[in-house]
Image (cartoon, rainbow, N blue to C red):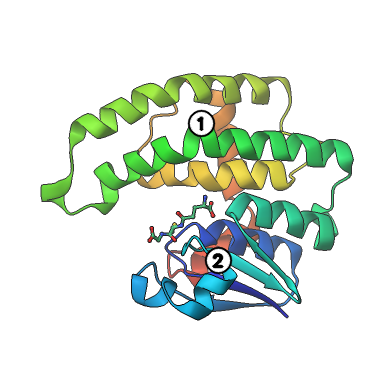
């Protein structure tokens, strides 16, 4: 059975959303982000970065959340299966989202929602929101021309990018200047598989 190392309050949720989409049986092997869980010889053999998530599928061990999802779409896709063109576009958008969105959205999330009040710095949040304007504008334009990022329907391209933007929900990211993006994100986050993930996290 597929095993995903991680927890429901981390980037592992991106892969859990994908696992819920493809409907393949899997086990969530709970690992927190503490060194006690990740800096162990057993875990370092799986992921030398001492980070979550990590996927184990038989002899294959994969880390990096976006790569895990691209692999799951290729191998188990079911309704998420995609051919070379969609895979190419999904890789493009996934790498782009990691480079252009992931760090800024994490900073916003930390300084608006996750850090204790006395550690939050509003200037971090303002800076991140400012720097996000450009990539969000690019995404909005792409989604104005078509309803999805690749192919004719919801694919791993949408899932990977939306799973990063979901942090914006928690951190009150202002999407009023990006109506196409806001509509698309609402659609992605309304999927039954995402609702199942939220139920697993106790966030209905
Ligand atoms: N680029 C990696 C990032 C993984 C990552 O940073 N995971 C965090 C949890 S969300 C982690 O394991 N942190 C533990 C630490 O920093 O020690 C991915 O997308 O999988």
Q: Secondary structure at mark 1?
A: helix
For numbered disc 2, what is the local secondary structure? loop
Q: Position of residue 126 (x, y in %)?
A: 27, 27
Q: In the rendering, which numbered label is found on residue 81?
A: none
Mark 1 sits on what residue?
100
Q: Quick check: 107 left or right of 88?
A: left
- 136 lies above or below 74: above
Looking at the rendered image, the quarter that the N terminus falls into is bottom right
Which of discs 2 and 1 lies nearer the camera? The answer is 2
Residue 160 visible in this rendered orientation of the protein: yes
Q: How busy is the neighbourhood of tag 2: few (under 14 within 10 Å), some, or many (20 plus)?
A: many
Residue 47 numbered tag: 2
Furthest residue to the right? 83
Q: On the picture, is 7 further left or further right than 60?
A: left
Query: What whole-number distance in Å separates the C-alpha atoms at marks 2 and 1?
Result: 24 Å
Q: Give coordinates of residue 167: x percent, y percent.
A: 43, 46
Mark sitting earlier along the chain (2/1): 2
Residue 161 placement, left or right of 203:
right
Identify the residue at image location x=34%, y=70%: 34
140 or 32, nearer to the observer = 32
Q: Residues within 10 Å of mark 1 (few under 14, many from 20)?
A: some
């Amino acid at each position: 059975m597929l095993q995903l190392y991680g927890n429901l309050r981390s980037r592992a949720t991106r892969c859990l959303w994908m696992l819920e989409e493809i409907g393949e049986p899997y086990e969530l092997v709970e690992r927190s982000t503490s060194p006690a869980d990740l800096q162990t010889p057993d875990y370092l053999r799986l992921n030398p970065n001492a980070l979550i998530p990590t996927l184990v599928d038989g002899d294959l061990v994969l880390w990096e959340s976006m790569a895990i999802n691209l692999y799951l779409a290729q191998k188990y896709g079911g309704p998420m299966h995609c051919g070379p063109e969609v895979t190419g576009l999904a890789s493009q958008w996934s790498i782009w989202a990691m480079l252009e969105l992931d760090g800024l959205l994490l900073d916003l999330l930390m300084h608006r929602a996750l850090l204790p009040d006395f550690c939050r710095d509003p200037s971090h949040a303002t800076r991140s929101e400012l720097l996000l304007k450009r990539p969000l504008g690019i995404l909005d334009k792409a989604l104005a021309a078509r309803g999805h990022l690749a192919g004719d329907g919801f694919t791993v391209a949408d899932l990977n990018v939306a799973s990063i933007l979901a942090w914006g929900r928690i951190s009150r990211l202002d999407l009023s200047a990006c109506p196409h993006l806001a509509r698309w994100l609402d659609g992605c986050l309304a999927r039954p598989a995402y609702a199942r993930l939220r139920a697993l996290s106790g966030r209905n």
